[in-house]
Image: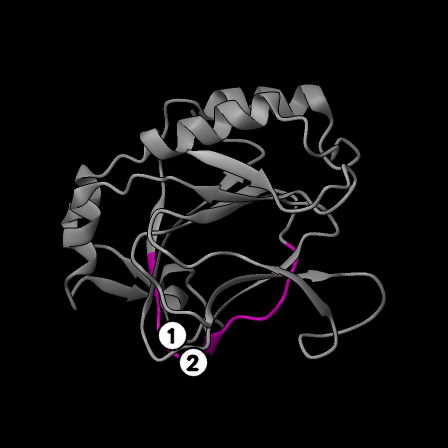
Amino acid sequence: MKFRPVFTDRKAMPVWEITGVTIPEIVDRAIGTDTNWTSADVVYNLPISKNPGKYLYTGEEMLKMNFKSIMDPVYNFLLTQKDYDFWDSWPTSQFQEALAKHLGFGSMDIWKILPNTSHGAHVDNLFIMGTVIVNIADNAEGSGTKYYDKRGLGNDDTWVPVYEAPVKKGTGVLHINTSSTLHKGHNNSDQDRYVAYTNIMSSIGH
């Protein structure tokens, strides 16, 4: 796996493009079925629909999946990276301590996002230190994750996009959650989008 910083300014939004990810074969079998997909609104126990067209794979195959071969390299990279300085958001010692607790626990979720779906630009809450999104299929152009310049007031129509993550299988994106990490998941194509996704939490129950 390789991590390429998207921006050259150390104080910029901390985003890396990921390439060279090996997708476990069991994932191909899981996403090749039309069954065992649960609406995100059901997963999150929401009374109204806030995640149209977004489905979590909940089949028994998930019990056999381990994404440690993907996530451990991410954690090890973040423990030593020099590309970005985001310590105003996440002080070094606490950040590294939390990351170290994640090593060996390779948990990711598998999501399907239907065509013509958008979930709005947002910044995550500060229980989340970062996010990893990996394409587990060759997703179509027009789907993906987009990042925006958050300076000034705006909305999805007026914020300036500054980067869009790749869509091909085995590629993805890693970002650290700061007050400037404005991003949006979307699928403006006519095909389903499939990703493995996880949030790196600031505290875990291990």
Q: Which residues are magenta?
A: 111-123
Image quadrant for the N terminus? top left
Residue 133 visible, this angle:
no
Report the front residue among 203 and 71: 71
**Res 41 quadrant in image:** bottom left
Where 99 sits versus 28, above or below? above
For image coordinates 52% across by 56% down, the residue present is 165
Where 118 sits versus 15, above or below? below
Q: What is the chief secondary structure element of the magenta stretch?
A: loop
**Is 129 covered by the magenta stretch?**
no
- The residue that label 1 is drawn on is 53
How far across and down, in percent of the image, does residue 6 sit? 63, 46
Identify residue type, mark 1.
Gly
Element under disc 2 = loop
How far across and down, in percent of the image, does residue 7 sit? 69, 46
Q: CA distance from mark 1 to mark 2?
A: 8 Å
**Res 126 quadrant in image:** top right
Element under disc 1 = loop
- Mark 1 or mark 2: whose residue is earlier in sequence: 1
Give me the disc on residue 116. 2
Identify residue type, mark 2.
Asn
Kindly give the residue lying farthest to the right in the view shown: 152
Report the front residue among 50 and 140: 140
Q: Give the class, few, some or many, for how many residues have Cα within 10 Å of label 2's Cα (few <14, many ≥20).
A: some
Q: Give the class, few, some or many, for how many residues have Cα within 10 Å of label 1's Cα (few <14, many ≥20).
A: some
CB atoms at circles 1 and 2 under 8 Å apart? yes
For image coordinates 30% across by 39% down, the residue present is 22
Residue 44 visible, this angle:
yes
**Is 119 covered by the magenta stretch?**
yes
Where 116 sits versus 198, above or below? below
